[in-house]
Amino acid sequence: MKHALLPIAVGLVVLMGTSCGKTPEAKPADQTRDARREARTAGRDAAKTAGETKQGPLTIGVMPKLIGIDFFNATEKGAKLAGQELGVEVVFDGPVTNDVQLQAQMLETWIARKYDGIAIAPNDPDAIAPVLEKARKRGIKVISWDADSKPSSRDFFVNQCTSRSVAKTLMDVMAEGVGLNAKYLILTGSLTAANQNIWMAEMEKYRQEKYPGMTNLSETPKASEEDQALATQVTTDCLKTYADLQGMFAITSVALPGAAEGLRKAGAAARVFLTGLSTPKTMREYVHDGTVKRFVLWNPVDLGYLAVYAAVATAKGELQPGAASFTAGHVGACRVEGDMIILGDPIIFDKSNIDNFDF
């Protein structure tokens, strides 16, 4: 029987070799065993490498609302510095526009790559929540920073300042600049940005308490969509529309220089007092030429730095719910309120101190 089957087997080998366009060649049994052995070894090596990767340096993905603007460039500097100090890999990347769907797409890639932690500044807290919740289910620790996401979608929120302190500082600067009966408008970045919406709500509450004579001339805030040219155009339009406009808040790092350019082009800096939130680097020329007298911010370098420290500590299990404080390198001890880590208080910039800052 064995001899009868041999021609059939040989014929099959010849047929298989011919169908691939190759000259028929018998493959020795020891070669087949070697190939199988190599495959098994490769599999063990791959598993070993995967294990070593998880035991090696952590990988933390840090995502701003968008890349390429001074504010988030400064946070990147702080994030990378923290990564160096902690011996972790920091991947800092984000969309080129404030698009939450692009953020979600990039996060899917980070989840697939099994990053140890994600620190994100969401463009929309609700829209980004499902993908963040997916990351958490996969064992990835999630930190929100600059703006919060839904609490169920992250472990901690790294907040630059309390919303109350930002609102209070902005309204006090406006009152000092224009007076207790100022008529003003607010130019925001995106109408879906959680941090900006919270700041505006707190500004209104504080206005009612401290400055009831002030008037917000628009029922809804103006939006610049984090586009500086659009902020300039919106400001120009507002100057034409509101003849009694005395003050203007521009509460993002892109909106404020855009609004300042609109005032400067219109020669309206003496008529309208402009303040808001932006970086010293961006606002330096407008402060020195008198277009903007005073504006507000915090240290964005330290914000990015703190976000990475918090993400690493959470990934390692060193930062747990219920903590009252958290210490991060040169930033020092930061207070923790519930699941929110607070960097500090706002800084007011003017001609006297703006040249002391390089971000």
Image (cartoon, rainbow, N blue to C red):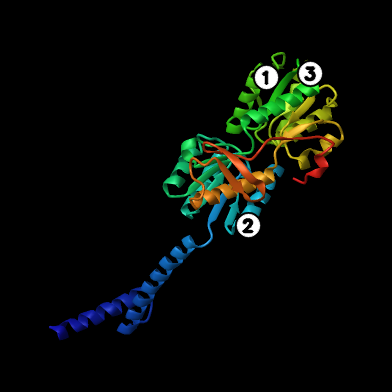
Residue identifier under label 2: 85
The answer to whether residue 290 shows anywhere in this view is: yes
Residue identifier under label 1: 207
Residue ID at (84%, 36%): 351
Q: In the drawing, does residue 161 fall left or right of residue 156?
A: right
Q: Are marks 1 and 3 in contact (CB under 8 Å)?
A: no
Q: CA distance from mark 2 to mark 3?
A: 47 Å
For marks 1 and 3 on the same chain, the one whose residue lies earlier in the sequence: 3
Looking at the rendered structure, the kind of residue marked 3 is: Gly
Looking at the rendered structure, the kind of residue marked 1 is: Arg
Tell me the SS state at disc 1. helix
Residue identifier under label 3: 179
Residue ID at (66%, 27%): 167
Tell me the SS state at disc 3. loop
Residue ID at (51%, 62%): 56
Q: Could you say which is closer to the camera, residue 248 or residue 20? A: 248
287 above or below 82?
Answer: above
| Picture quadrant where residue 171 is located | top right
Looking at the rendered structure, the kind of residue marked 2 is: Glu
Tell me the SS state at disc 2. helix
| Label 1 Cα neighbours within 10 Å, binned few <14 / some 14-19 / many ≥20 | many
